[in-house]
Amino acid sequence: MDVKRAKAIYEAKDNIPVRLEGKPIWIEHVDEANGMATVQLGNNPLDTHTVRVDRLEEVHKLQ
């Protein structure tokens, strides 16, 4: 994923599924200047990590 898409997902009103290494995450913050994102793993608000946005994968639902 690129920085612009990560930022768009973060700002979206809809819930857009994203994964990190196959695990569901929530994007908490996007650092556009450095290409990094702070993400929450699963439903645990204390389990956050800062990772490169190119490690994030948007989950596309089948129509």
Image: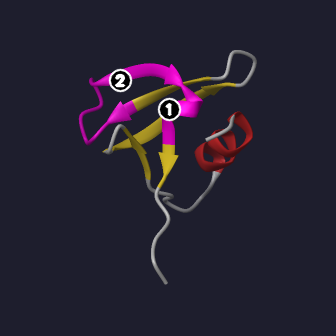
Residue 48 in the image: state x and y as whole percent.
35, 23
Which residue sits furthest left? Answer: 44
Q: Indicate left or right for 4 with 10 as reference.
A: right
Residue 6 in the image: state x and y as whole percent.
63, 41
Whether 41 is among the magenta residues is yes
Does dot 1 land on a helix, a strand or a loop? helix
Graded by Cα atoms within 10 Å as few (under 14), some (14 to 19) or many (20 or more), the crowding at tag 1 reads few
Residue visible at 69% across and 15% down? 34
Residue visible at 35% across and 37% down? 21
Q: Name the kind of residue labelled 2 in the image.
A: Thr
- Mark 2 or 1, closer to the camera: 1
Residue behind mark 1: 55
Q: Name the kind of residue labelled 1 in the image.
A: Arg
Disc on res. 17: none
User: How far apart are the two marked residues, 2 and 1, measured between alpha carbons?
Assistant: 15 Å
Question: From the image, which quarter does the N terminus lie in?
Answer: top right
Count of marks, rendered view: 2
Residue behind mark 2: 48
Whether 48 is among the magenta residues is yes
Graded by Cα atoms within 10 Å as few (under 14), some (14 to 19) or many (20 or more), the crowding at tag 2 reads some
Does dot 2 land on a helix, a strand or a loop? strand
Residue visible at 30% across and 31% down? 45
- Label 2 with label 1: CB-CB less than 8 Å: no
Q: Which residues are magenta?
A: 40-56
Q: Upstream in the sequence, badge 2 or badge 1?
A: 2
